[in-house]
C-alpha cells in the first residue's frame, strides 16, 4: 500500500512538473507557424505606416503656413511712434514688445491682462510682453509714451 501511494505521488509530481515547464519553453511563433507573416509586414503593414506618416507630415506642413482669415488670426508686428494711440476693436489682442505706453480705458472698464489676470484701468503703464485683450469696441487701447513695437491680432486703428 505504501509502495502504491509513493508511486502515485511520484506520477502526480512528474505530471505537475511537465505541465508547469511546457509553457515556459513554448515559442509564441516559429518559422513553421509565425504570428505574422513577413509578406504581411512588407506588403500591408509597412505601406500603411508610410502612408500615415506622409499624410501626417503633409497636414502639419499645411497647418504651419500663414492663412489670412477675415478679422485676422495671426499677429501683425506694428511699429508705433511716441504720441500715437493704438485703439483696438472688440476681441483685439495686443502685446507690447518694445517701448512704453499707457493704457487707454473707458468708463465701462479697462483692458484685460490675461497674463496676470488683471483688469488694467485708464492711465496705468502698459506691461511689456503681456497678452492684453480689448473686450469691446469702445475706444480702448494703448497710448505710446516712447517709440515701440506692438504685436496686434485683430482689427485696430492708429490715432495721432
Image (cartoon, helix red, strand yellow):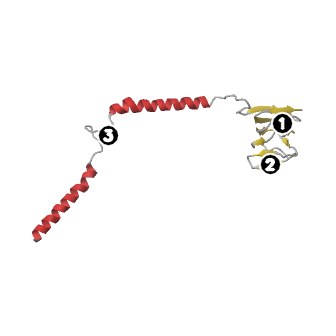
Measured Cα–Cα span from mark 3 to mark 2: 64 Å
Count of all numbered marks drawn on residues in the image? 3
- Quarter of the image that includes the C terminus: top right
**What residue would you read off at disc 2?**
119
**Residue 91 in which image quadrant:** top right
Query: Residues under labels 3 and 1: Cα distance?
Result: 67 Å
Residue 49 horizontal/vertical position (percent): 45, 33
Question: Local crowd at mark 3 within 10 Å, few (<14), some, or many (≥20)?
Answer: few
Vertically, is 109 above or below 16?
above
The quadrant of the image that shows the N terminus is bottom left
| Disc 2 packing (10 Å; few <14; some 14–19; many ≥20) | some
Which label's residue is closer to the chain start, 3 or 1? 3
SS of the residue under disc 1: strand
Residue, x 87% and y 44% (percent of image)? 106
Q: CA distance from mark 1 to mark 2?
A: 17 Å
Give the SS element for disc 3.
loop
Residue 87 shows which numbered tag?
Answer: 1
Image position, residue 83 (x, y; %): 89, 35
Residue at x 40% of width, y 33% of height: 45
Quadrant assignment, res 122: top right
**Foreground of the two, 25 or 58:** 58
Q: Tell me what residue is drawn at x 18 percent, y 59 percent.
A: 14
Q: Which mark is residue 140?
A: none
Residue located beneath label 3 in the image: 35
Please say if the residues under marks 3 and 1 sit with CB atoms less than 8 Å apart.
no
Amino acid at each position: 500500500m505504501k509502495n502504491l501511494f509513493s508511486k502515485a505521488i511520484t506520477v502526480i509530481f512528474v505530471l505537475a512538473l511537465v505541465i508547469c515547464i511546457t509553457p515556459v519553453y513554448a515559442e509564441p511563433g516559429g518559422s513553421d507557424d509565425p504570428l505574422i507573416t513577413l509578406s504581411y509586414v512588407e506588403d500591408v503593414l509597412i505601406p500603411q505606416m508610410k502612408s500615415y506618416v506622409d499624410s501626417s507630415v503633409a497636414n502639419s506642413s499645411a497647418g504651419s503656413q500663414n492663412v489670412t482669415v477675415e478679422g485676422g488670426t495671426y499677429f501683425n508686428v506694428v511699429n508705433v511712434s511716441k504720441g500715437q494711440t493704438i485703439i483696438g476693436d472688440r476681441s483685439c489682442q495686443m502685446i507690447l514688445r518694445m517701448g512704453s505706453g499707457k493704457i487707454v480705458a473707458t468708463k465701462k472698464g479697462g483692458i484685460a491682462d490675461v497674463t496676470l489676470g488683471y483688469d488694467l484701468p485708464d492711465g496705468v503703464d502698459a506691461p511689456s510682453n503681456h497678452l492684453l485683450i480689448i473686450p469691446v469696441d469702445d475706444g480702448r487701447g494703448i497710448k505710446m509714451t516712447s517709440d515701440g513695437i506692438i504685436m496686434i491680432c485683430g482689427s485696430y486703428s492708429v490715432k495721432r
